[in-house]
Amino acid sequence: MKGYYLTSYLTTWIWILFLIWCFGNSLKMNIIKYINMYYLSIILLFGYILFIIADMNIKGEKYELKFYLMNAIIHALPLAILCSNGKTDDKYGIETILIVFILYIIHLTYIGKDIVSIYTDDSFRFRSIDDVKTYYKNLAFF
């Protein structure tokens, strides 16, 4: 397992940007008005649903129930927060998606991966909370 494992997933990129957006929004930073998290949050949720359907039904993978529920909440939370705060406009939405996708593809190219292999060919996936603990325990900087 390499240290770039988590940055290989679009989920991580969207969550990092969402946390930056939340922080900037709470501080009323002006630049945040140019970052639209709404469509990225939709992609986060529906991408996860499609991934799980493919992974569990097509590949026959099994997930620990607690881990599956935790992941479902993690992937739905940004959209729920945005909807509850009325942040569902589309201004700068396409621009935000394009910038994130371009940076993500550049990152994947840099680490020698592509989108298809990340989501279909990787042999290691977190399937339980113990997998997450083991991953972080084995990283060199921990």
Image: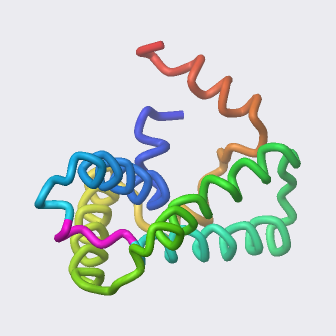
Dominant secondary structure of the residues highlighted in magenta in the image? loop
The part of the image, by quadrant, that contains residue 35 is bottom left
Question: Which residue lies at the image location 22% right of the left edge and 81% below the top edge?
Answer: 92
Q: Is residue 126 left or right of residue 81?
A: right
Magenta segment includes 35: yes
Q: Nearer the viewer, residue 121 or 72?
A: 72
Counting every numbered tag in the picture gives 0
- From the top left corner, tell me how far across and down residue 56 is, in percent: 82, 66
Question: Which residue lies at the image location 56% right of the left edge and 24% below the top edge?
Answer: 136
Residue 26, compared with residue 53, is above or below; it is: above
Magenta segment includes 110: no
- From the top left corner, tell me how far across and down residue 98 is, in percent: 25, 78
- From the top left corner, tell me how far across and down residue 90 is, in percent: 32, 86
Q: Nearer the viewer, residue 50 or 31?
A: 31
Q: How is the image coloured?
A: rainbow
Q: Is residue 25 left or right of residue 12?
A: left
The part of the image, by quadrant, that contains residue 47 is bottom right
Q: Is residue 132 left or right of residue 41?
A: right
- From the top left corner, tell me how far across and down residue 76 is, in percent: 62, 64
Q: In the rendered structure, which segment of residues is drawn in magenta? A: 33-37
Residue 51, compared with residue 89, is above or below; it is: above
Question: Which residue lies at the image location 69% right of the left edge and 43% below the top edge?
Answer: 126
Question: Which residue lies at the image location 61% right of the left edge and 76% below the top edge?
Answer: 46
